[in-house]
């Protein structure tokens, strides 16, 4: 993956807060840092962990944290004078109502397709090759009665969203929304056979499968409709103040990402076997050499 903005990271930047921000901005998040979000399971707090380090470079910044799901956050971004949210996929539709940080707040390996072993056998992929990529559209066609679970308010990328829209017309999409960490709830539904397929990030599945103590065997495959890696950006209200604030976050990311603690804030949420791959991606994106 090529990041055209990488040369900009070579220029030192100071995360100076814009002047004239009389109104206290909102930080919109779908997770209470102190809460057990689903079945007494703690959530993946990479969003808060990285923002904590960003705020070290924004000493004058003050905001008010508001717990909302993704759909509500987007509604508020369209109407609130000054609000921001983190770890969001960037696309043209969202750019119509929000400003995005120039660089991602965090990075992680791309989405994979997960299913129970019996479902994989029915689809003819009981023993997937480690480096092979499959078409999600083809797999869903081989399993015409399968239901696909997705998290409401999340953007899965245009290729997958187009397929989801087609399947929704056939009543094959189950959407879960809410503040109970829908990703964990959806994984629980997969393990219990209430949906047959989910598309999820590897670190999310690793974390919640262990925490929920699932005894079932899951099969995962890379899918051609998903990018190999994904960046989660900070987005702010599309106002003049929001533009200045998202630039302050961009400057803070450029500074904080050079600190190994920022890398560790990522690695904490990945299985040790993934650390080398995640570190290599981190170095590529943030122009570091850890």
Image: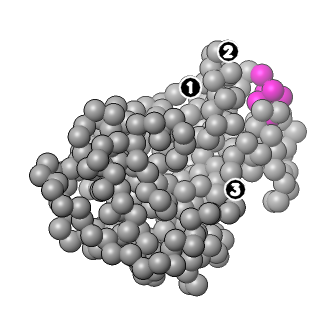
Name the N-terminal-most of marks 2 and 3.
2
Residue 143 falls within the magenta-colored stretch = yes
Name the N-terminal-most of marks 1 and 3.
1
Question: What residue is shown with label 2?
Answer: 170
Residue at the image position 51 percent from the left and 79 percent from the top: 10
Q: CA distance from mark 2 to mark 1?
A: 11 Å
Q: CA distance from mark 1 to mark 3?
A: 25 Å
Q: Which mark is residue 77?
A: none
Question: What residue is shown with label 3?
Answer: 228
Secondary-structure class at tag 2: loop
CB of mark 1 within 8 Å of CB of mark 3?
Answer: no
What percent of the width, then of the height, locates residue 74? 37, 36
Q: Which mark is residue 174?
A: 1
Residue 266 falls within the magenta-colored stretch = no
Residue pushed farthest bottom? 289
The image quarter containing residue 290 is bottom right
């Amino acid at each position: 993956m090529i990041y055209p903005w990488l040369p900009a990271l070579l220029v030192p930047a100071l995360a100076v807060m814009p002047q004239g921000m009389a109104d206290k901005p909102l930080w919109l998040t779908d997770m209470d840092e102190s809460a057990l979000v689903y079945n007494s399971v703690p959530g993946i707090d990479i969003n808060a962990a990285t923002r904590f380090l960003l705020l070290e470079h924004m000493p004058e910044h003050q905001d008010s944290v508001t717990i909302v799901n993704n759909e509500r956050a987007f509604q508020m971004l369209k109407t609130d004078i000054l609000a921001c949210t983190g770890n969001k996929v960037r696309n043209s539709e969202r750019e119509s109502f929000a400003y995005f940080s120039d660089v991602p707040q965090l990075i992680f390996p791309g989405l994979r397709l997960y299913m129970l072993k019996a479902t994989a056998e029915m689809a003819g992929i009981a023993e997937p090759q480690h480096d092979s990529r499959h078409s999600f559209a083809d797999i869903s066609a081989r399993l015409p009665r399968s239901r696909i679970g997705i998290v409401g308010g999340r953007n899965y990328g245009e290729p997958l969203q187009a397929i989801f829209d087609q399947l929704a017309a056939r009543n094959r999409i189950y959407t879960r929304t809410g503040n109970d960490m829908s990703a964990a709830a959806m994984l629980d539904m997969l393990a219990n056979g209430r949906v047959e397929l989910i598309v999820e990030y590897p670190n999310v599945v690793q974390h919640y499968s262990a925490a929920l103590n699932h005894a079932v065997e899951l099969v995962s495959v890379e899918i051609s409709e998903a990018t190999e890696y994904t960046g989660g950006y900070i987005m702010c209200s599309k106002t003049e103040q929001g533009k200045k604030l998202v630039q302050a976050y961009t400057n803070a990311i450029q500074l904080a990402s050079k600190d190994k603690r920022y890398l560790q804030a990522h690695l904490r949420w990945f299985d040790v076997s993934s650390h080398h791959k995640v570190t290599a991606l981190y170095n590529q994106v943030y122009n570091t050499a850890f």
